[in-house]
């Protein structure tokens, strides 16, 4: 009979600490207890404890600071970290921005329909989208802000769909596409035309209206049409670009997916 592998002491300790982080007993920015305290709590050897800390560091759940203010700082999982990992996998597989936008063309309209179908949409969805459109209108003449503001609207559609797995997975793709789109328009010498920007803003308003009315089929259709147009505009400019994982860490996004 095949022997059942027993977990190592370090893995057991790492599992206990991981549960403390994921359950919320340890918060973002907390510092793990001192090694002396952990030795006492778990009754393990220093090498086993160091290995447990290394496991958590590899998981991205802690970062170890050196020096006089040293310690292991807790980091909760986030969509940004998930997006960074996914983007590294996509870059390794030579995936293109067209692949990411193609996926979003299928997935984001589903989120738009789910937003429209929410019974609590007037409290949980509509005010958020209204605020994003107001931001776009107020800063419309500032071309440097247009792309990021427009992407915030799309990210809000996903973040308010009401399904956590979809928020995380589709939200990660949104962040990857947002980073690429921001890079394209920042690098291109010819800014997006006001005509294109105004058309996109009108699309956002029509989509908001459909969601406010609870018209899920119309919300899906409008999202599909708008995404197709936005995809053409960005890929026409940045056709030679590829997925770059480093763009995720270089771009600031809203905290909707955390």
Image (cartoon, rainbow, N blue to C red):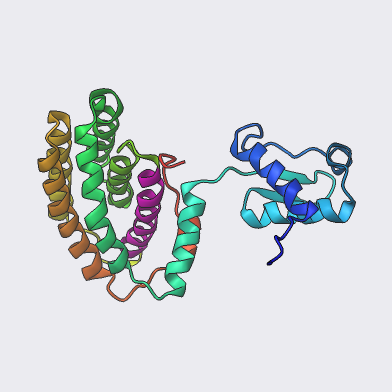
Residue 198 in sight here: no
Residue 49, x across and y down, in percent: 82, 50
> Quadrant of residue 20 in the image?
top right
Disc count in the image?
Answer: 0
Residue 29, x across and y down, in percent: 65, 38
Relative to residue 156, is residue 146 depicted above or below? Answer: below
Region in magenta: 165-186
> Quadrant of residue 156 in the image?
top left
Left or right: 223 with respect to 86? Answer: left
Quarter placement of the N terminus? bottom right
**Residue at point 12% right, 47% down?**
222
Residue 67 in sight here: yes
Residue 144, x across and y down, in percent: 32, 52
Relative to residue 156, is residue 12 depicted above or below? Answer: below
**Residue at point 22% right, 57% down?**
105
Q: Judge by depth and name the residue closer to the eye, 61 or 147.
A: 61
Please name the predominant secondary structure of the magenta segment in the image.
helix
Residue 231, x across and y down, in percent: 21, 61
Residue 127 falls within the magenta-colored stretch = no
Q: Judge by depth and name the residue closer to the eye, 191 or 210.
A: 210
Q: Judge by depth and name the residue closer to the eye, 219 or 193.
A: 219
Left or right: 151 with respect to 217? Answer: right
Left or right: 84 with respect to 154? Answer: right
**Residue at point 71% right, 64% down?**
3
């Amino acid at each position: 009979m095949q022997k059942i592998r027993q977990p190592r002491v370090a893995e057991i300790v790492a599992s206990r600490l991981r549960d403390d982080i994921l359950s919320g007993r340890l918060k973002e920015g907390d510092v793990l207890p001192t090694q002396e305290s952990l030795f006492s709590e778990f009754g393990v050897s220093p090498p086993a404890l160091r290995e447990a800390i290394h496991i958590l560091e590899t998981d991205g759940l802690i970062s170890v600071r050196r020096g006089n203010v040293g310690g292991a700082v807790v980091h909760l999982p986030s969509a940004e970290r998930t997006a960074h990992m996914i983007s590294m996998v996509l870059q390794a597989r030579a995936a293109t921005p067209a692949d990411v936008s193609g996926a979003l063309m299928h997935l984001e309209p589903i989120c738009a329909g789910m937003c429209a179908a929410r019974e609590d949409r007037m409290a949980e969805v509509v005010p958020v989208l209204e605020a994003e459109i107001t931001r776009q209108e107020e800063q419309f003449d500032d071309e440097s802000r247009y792309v990021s503001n427009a992407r915030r609207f799309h990210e809000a559609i996903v973040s308010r769909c009401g399904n956590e797995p979809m928020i995380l997975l589709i939200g990660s793709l949104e962040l990857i596409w947002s980073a690429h789109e921001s890079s394209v328009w920042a690098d291109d010498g010819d800014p997006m035309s006001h005509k294109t920007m105004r058309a996109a803003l009108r699309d956002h308003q029509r989509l908001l209206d459909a969601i406010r009315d609870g018209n899920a089929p119309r919300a899906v259709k409008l999202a599909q049409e708008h995404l197709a147009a936005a995809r053409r505009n960005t890929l026409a400019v940045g056709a030679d670009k590829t997925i770059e994982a480093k763009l995720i860490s270089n771009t600031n996004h809203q905290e909707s997916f955390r």
